């Protein structure tokens, strides 16, 4: 068995590191901090770390998805963000709770995400579209931490209400509650086998419970201050803990003892995590440092094999679910209504173990190894990080090791507690008159009924909350019914209709085109999405279930793609592949999502708030330059890629009417130099190239009508050629200081950033 070795040392956070998670391939490590940032640390030398900024307050929890494609973070700002772990640092955000988010965790299939909060709830969301599924509401104080079981069927949570709860994810019911009399758990984790949970407690202890027998099976009192975070080694044989006593400790769970104390942090150690293979672990502290250690000690232990043998005996929590345990209340489950079996098991607890029991325990928790209480006699090493040179000082220590829950030699919380329970129960039976006993039993029964009633009410409350959330989600669509006047539709000719949102300010009011094709229809751009365009067109009989309709977005900006989500289930929604990700994920940076209250001349619906406005992640399909949109019987439109305004901007050529649909690529503004090429999505170089290409195209094709994304229809191509030429010419003398500063001012007000693109 080799000693763990400090390998890397990252320091860029400006406050306490709160949470760590390895990417599944162990190529990256993500850290969250009270400084409101996330850092993504690469393990390759010479690769830059990425800093993710988005949360408005402390980040409490970070977690890599099982596939490694997403990182979830939970913050004091009440929000959960899902980040793409790449240089861009893109994220989607949703308000998850009414108070600080304390913990986030992905289910092992990557489909669900849970969040726990200071609002006392745990909520479960779909990862795709972040749809609320249900909440767990029985805690009466902050829920510090919650985790899915490895098989995803259970959830464990710990709260400042001094309880740890096990939940059945299918029924949303609390299946068991563990009580922590001396403090509360800061952190809780499932053992890789799914049969045990471990936690770190404010009373400086590390504890492990078996969730099948619902008993505390290991109890380590080696830390001298609050234990902030724990992590099981993936082979299940070790547990790592981080404490406010500035140390990390490694416990050998098979032998039930402390094997290492690691000193690396100056001040409280706040977080730990193992890599997926267990070959590395990371730690974070109040000293703003992230340390990465090579595990080493797991290599010579025949851990994986013995673990596998042991696991096969475990039932992955089945016992817990099939057990006839029906109530979670302390009163009914433990003390007040003793059953014979409980008394006898409690009595055994307060006596030395029988040899049978000891044998059973051996198999159960120690995976074929003797489970004996041992004092550390020299095998426990202390490792000290003595500075940035990463030299490890290793010193032997004779400090006391693990203290087991069933140990008589070192009394501890749980055994005392059991004895106290036993006393009360025996008293109840021995000293009280039968009458009093009857009365007490009656009271207990009443309490039991009350508890069950409360549980039912809580379930109903959860269901109501779920429904409310769904109604909220659909609020925008529903609202359209209240406001049939939001859209104005004009017939341009027998096969073209123009719809506009006339209560939105003209400068950004987009043109929504509906082409009646020979066999199917095409909608080009969809408006803001604040009201339901689909329903509006159906009301006008311009859209019906019997006739196919395709939706095309000329680019990802909100004024063109915001309404696409109303069509996503029944129509094909198309967008150029370079703008696809933005719309598919509802990224703020690519959809812009920029609306101000003053831009609405009328509220689209009651209680509309521009602050909540966003383009939702929308199901769509990517298309490329040259894509043909088939409207049947040789009626088709041809997609021309015209990047510049955005990467994936397109122009659509419609040979049937010799017309062009130009989106934001070109429209009738005062002067071609006003075309928008300075947005964060824009590129002047590409715009210039596209403008030149379009001039060529216009020369080669007869074009009778131009239908732009904004403003009036243009009746001849000369005006378009003029605008594009003006645009090209304006770039010859571009970047005059006055213009740049003016654009910068505009950009600043859009995105509150100094960074903007001009001529590059
Ligand atoms: Zn645009
Ligand atoms: Zn636009």
Image: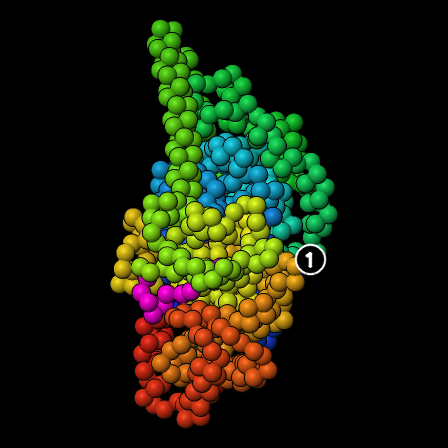
Say whether residue 508 is magenta. Answer: yes
Mark 1 burial class by Cα count in 10 Å: few <14, some 14-19, many 20+: few
Could you tell me which residue is drawn at 58 percent across and 73 percent down? 640
Q: Residue at x 42, y 23 (%)?
A: 452
Residue 737 left/right relative to 547: left
Q: Is residue 486 above or below residue 197?
A: below
Q: Is residue 481 above or below residue 715?
A: above
* Image quadrant where one finds the N terminus: bottom right
Q: SS at mark 1? A: loop
Q: Residue furthest front?
A: 494
Q: In the image, what residue occupies the spot 45% across and 28% down?
A: 328
Residue 414 appears in view = no
Magenta residue check for 75: no
Residue plotted at (65% across, 59% down): 633
Q: Residue 360: percent from the left, percent from the top?
A: 65, 31
Measuring from the top left, give residue 349's x and y in whole percent. Answer: 52, 27
The vertical placement of 595 against 726, above or below, is: above
Q: Is 286 left or right of 344, judged from the image as shown? A: left
Q: Judge by depth and name the residue closer to the eye, 118 or 642.
A: 642
Whether disc 1's CB lies below 8 Å from ligand 1 is answered no
Q: How many marks?
A: 1
Q: Which residue is mark 1?
A: 299
Residue bounds of the magenta highlight: 504-514
Residue 505: tell me if it is visible.
Answer: yes
- Residue 299 at x, y percent in the picture: 69, 57
Q: Nearer the viewer, residue 117 or 506?
A: 506
Q: In x, y percent, where is residue 566?
A: 47, 51
Residue sitting nearer the eye, 548 or 642:
548
The colour style of the image is rainbow
């Amino acid at each position: 068995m080799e000693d763990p070795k400090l390998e890397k040392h990252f320091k860029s956070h400006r406050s306490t590191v709160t949470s760590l998670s390895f990417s599944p391939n162990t190529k990256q490590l993500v850290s969250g901090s009270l400084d409101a940032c996330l850092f993504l640390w690469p393990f390759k030398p010479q690769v830059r770390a990425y800093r993710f900024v988005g949360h408005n307050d402390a980040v409490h929890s970070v977690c890599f998805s099982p596939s490694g494609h997403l990182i979830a973070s939970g913050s004091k700002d009440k929000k959960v963000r899902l980040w793409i772990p790449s240089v861009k640092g893109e994220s989607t955000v949703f308000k998850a709770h009414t108070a600080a988010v304390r913990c986030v965790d992905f289910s092992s299939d990557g489909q669900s995400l849970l969040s726990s909060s200071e609002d006392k709830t745990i909520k479960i969301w779909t990862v795709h579209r972040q749809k609320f599924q249900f909440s767990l509401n029985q805690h009466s104080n902050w829920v510090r931490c919650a985790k899915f079981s490895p098989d995803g069927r259970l959830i464990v949570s710990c709260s400042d209400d001094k309880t740890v709860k096990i939940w059945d994810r299918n029924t949303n019911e609390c299946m068991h509650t563990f009580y922590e009399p001396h403090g509360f758990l800061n952190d809780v984790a499932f053992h890789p086998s799914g049969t045990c949970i471990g936690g770190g407690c404010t009373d400086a202890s590390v504890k492990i419970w078996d969730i099948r027998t619902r008993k505390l099976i290991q109890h380590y009192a080696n830390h001298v201050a609050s234990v902030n975070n724990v992590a099981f080694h993936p082979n299940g044989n070790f547990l790592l803990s981080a404490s406010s006593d500035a140390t990390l400790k490694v416990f050998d769970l098979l032998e039930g003892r402390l094997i290492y104390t690691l000193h690396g942090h100056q001040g409280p150690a706040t977080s730990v995590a193992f890599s997926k293979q267990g070959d590395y672990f990371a730690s974070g502290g109040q000293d703003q440092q992230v340390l990465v250690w090579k595990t080493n000690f797991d290599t010579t232990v025949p851990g994986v094999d013995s673990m596998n043998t042991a696991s096969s005996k475990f039932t992955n929590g089945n016992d817990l679910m099939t057990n006839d345990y029906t109530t979670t209340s302390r009163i009914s489950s433990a003390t007040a209504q003793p059953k014979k079996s409980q008394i006898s098991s409690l009595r055994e607890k307060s006596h030395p173990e029988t040899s049978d029991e000891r044998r059973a325990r051996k198999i159960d928790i120690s995976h074929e190894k003797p489970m004996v209480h041992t004092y550390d006699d020299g095998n426990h090493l202390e490792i000290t990080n003595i500075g940035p040179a990463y030299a490890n000082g290793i010193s032997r220590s004779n400090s006391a090791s693990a203290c087991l829950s069933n140990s008589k030699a070192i009394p501890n919380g749980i055994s005392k507690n059991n004895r106290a329970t036993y006393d009360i129960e025996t008293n109840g039976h021995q000293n009280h008159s039968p009458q009093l006993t009857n009365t007490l039993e009656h009271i207990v029964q009443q309490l039991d009924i009350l508890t069950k009633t409360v549980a039912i009410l809580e379930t109903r409350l959860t269901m109501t909350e779920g429904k409310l959330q769904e109604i909220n989600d659909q609020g925008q669509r529903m609202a359209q019914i209240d406001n049939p006047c939001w859209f104005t539709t004009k017939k341009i000719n027998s096969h073209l209709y123009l719809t506009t949102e006339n209560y939105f300010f003209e400068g950004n009011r987009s043109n929504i085109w509906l082409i009646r094709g020979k066999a199917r229809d095409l909608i080009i751009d969809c408006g803001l999405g604040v009201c339901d365009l689909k329903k509006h067109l159906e009301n006008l009989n311009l859209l019906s279930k019997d006739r196919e309709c395709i939706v095309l977005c000329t680019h990802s900006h909100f004024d063109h793609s915001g309404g696409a989500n109303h069509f996503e289930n029944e129509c094909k929604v198309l967008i150029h592949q370079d703008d696809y990700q933005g719309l598919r994920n509802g990224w703020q940076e690519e959809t812009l999502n920029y609306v101000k209250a003053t831009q609405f001349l009328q509220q689209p619906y009651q209680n509309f708030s521009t602050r909540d406005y966003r383009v939702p992640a929308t199901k769509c399909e990517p298309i490329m330059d040259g894509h043909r949109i088939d409207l049947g019987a040789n009626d088709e439109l041809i997609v021309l890629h015209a990047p510049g305004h955005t990467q994936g901007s397109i122009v659509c050529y419609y040979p049937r009417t010799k017309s062009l649909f130009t989106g934001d690529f070109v429209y009738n503004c005062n002067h071609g130099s006003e075309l928008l090429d300075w947005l964060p999505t824009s590129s002047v170089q590409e715009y210039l190239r596209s403008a030149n290409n379009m001039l060529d195209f216009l020369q080669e094709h007869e074009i009778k009508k131009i239908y732009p994304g904004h403003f009036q229809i243009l009746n001849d191509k000369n005006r378009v050629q003029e605008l594009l030429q003006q645009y090209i010419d304006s770039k010859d003398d571009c970047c005059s200081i006055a213009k740049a500063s003016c654009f910068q001012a505009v950009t600043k007000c859009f995105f509150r950033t100094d960074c903007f693109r001009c001529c590059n």
